[in-house]
Image: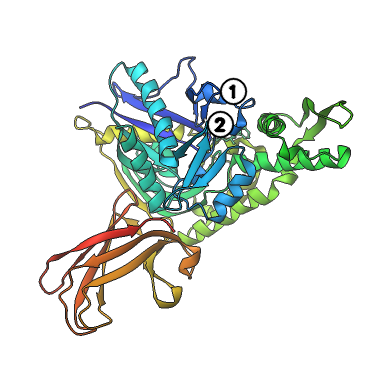
Amino acid sequence: MSKIIGIDLGTTNSCAAIVENGTVKLIPYKGGEFIIPSIFAIDEKGNELIGHEAKRQWQLNPRNTVYAAKRLVGRSFTSDVVAAMQKTVAYEMKPGERNDVLLDIGHKHFRLAEISAKILNKIRVVAQDYLQEKVSRAVVTVPAYFTDRQRQAVKDAGKLVQLEVVRIINEPTAAALAYGIGKNLHETVVIYDLGGGTFDVSIIEIRDRVFEVKATGGDIFLGGLDFDQAMIDYVIREFQKKHDIDLSTDPVAMQRIKDLAERIKIDLSSREQAPFNVPFVTMTLQGQPLNIDFVFTRLMLEEMTTKLVDRSIEILNRVMKDADLDPARVDELLLVGGQTRMPVVQKRLTALFGKPPSKGVHPDEAVAIGAALYAHSLEDNSNLRLQLLDVIPMAIGLEKAGGSFHEVFPRNAAIPNAKAIEATTSYDGQTEVAMRIFQGDAPEVAQNELLGDFLFSGLRPGEAGKARIEITFDVNIEGILTMSARDPDTGKQMKTTVRVTQH
Ligand code: AMP
């Protein structure tokens, strides 16, 4: 059997690792870099570019360069998230047949699963070059706050390129593995993971080789990209005030501003101020070239992004409450994700917990390392034994009459988990029962995510209210739901059909 690699499939960057001869290593790319940008592009000649190659030509070809596609995975085209995203990216989105999102680039349409598949494949090729052997299996990490549908989409992406995703694990859980394995710890740790696109927080109890998630939460629309966007909005606004020109309609100018915004944001983590210069960004009606020429201070950046940091702390507080945990009882705070390098994030967390964050994990590498360690534990010849006890991030349940949501599993329910509910028929001779399953924490289904519209058939016809059906909800260790039904009197399985998976 080939080796199983660990993949951190990030919103902005991806990274892979493997255990070789008993030690875990990040898999290097050509130039020795460990990170592969999660970017896909088609150049003017129709060539497909992935990773660094795609990033390099991004400024000149923003219309046909896809980034942050992970934010769209498992979303309906008509969702607010997609509408909001369309405003900030230069590539075009179109509705697919099932109201899914199609990306329109290089005069072709791509499903999101195809984009994720291309990035996964690139990582696999890099790993194969490094290992000099075929790679066909991986453990892939996802944000803890991903729904069943989003997790399923990652598995499907793997299938498209014959990469078996043997297990999906949560990013903060992976980081905790990287931190805790082999240290014989007995600790409660908080993982605050603020990456390029998503924010996750998990509270994990480590008892040597047992990693038990107590509670989790997050926002898959809170990450470094939003910090960049706050700067971009400011630059556009100020430029408009000064020159009465709206740069937001110029994709090339926007791309240059975007690139620089991220670089200056990163600089401001180690400097108090930095110049923000984009020469010849546009021209006046008279043909006179105009430049962007500001000085950004760390304080300005902090003020512009306070709301984002506040949101993360609110979520953290809620998760602490869910776990019934007081900050004083937290043994370690682990910071994961590049955006946690921002000094004010560290300052606020230090104040909250009364001590500085742990230096025990590398914010960019911990997730891939944890995935690789877990992958190793799944290999036949491994003597690494681990027990992961995770939870679902949001409730799973069904739609009741009138559109209300009936929870079957509450948020933070331990997984794997199964629950059966019993239903009866509402009219004479009924042989089928339909059920819409949702995931989310809102009391109305309309605000939650539709996981599937199921039809159970094969009920024995009888009087209304007499025929019974037992429906089982089974959430596996990866947070993926399977539905089944049986006749409770005969024990016979009934046919289960998923009618739609998108709304
Ligand atoms: P990740 O998904 O963990 O790779 O996080 C990437 C995000 O972290 C991007 O939005 C980066 O701009 C951001 N980032 C990386 N380094 C720094 C830094 N030194 N200060 C602030 N943000 C950073």
Q: What element carries label 2?
A: strand
Find residue 371 and report its horizontal and vertical position in percent.
37, 35
Q: What element carries label 1?
A: loop
Viewer-side residue, 94 vs 66: 94
Amino acid type, mark 2: Thr
The vertical placement of 403 against 502, above or below, is below
Q: Do the residues labelled 2 and 1 touch (CB within 8 Å)?
A: yes
Q: Residue at x 77, y 27 (%)?
A: 278
Q: 10 Å neighbourhood of mark 1: few (<14), some, or many (≥20)? A: some
The reply to whether residue 192 is in sight is no
The vertical placement of 102 against 54, above or below, is below
- The number of discs equals 2
Residue 460 shown left or right of residue 456 in the figure: left
Q: Which residue is drawn at 79% across and 43% down?
A: 237
Query: Of marks 2 and 1, which one's residue comes earlier in the chain?
Result: 1
Find residue 70 and report its horizontal and vertical position in percent.
48, 41
Per the rendering, the mark at residue 57 is 1
Per the rendering, the mark at residue 86 is none
Amino acid type, mark 1: Gln
The residue at label 1 has a CB less than 8 Å from ligand 1: no
User: In which of the image's four quarters is ligand 1 placed?
Assistant: top right
Viewer-side residue, 154 vs 497: 497
Viewer-side residue, 88 vs 420: 88
Find residue 428 and report its horizontal and vertical position in percent.
22, 83
Residue 125 shown left or right of residue 81 in the figure: left
Viewer-side residue, 230 vs 303: 230
Image quadrant occupied by the C terminus: bottom left
Per the rendering, the mark at residue 65 is 2
The vertical placement of 78 against 53, above or below, is below
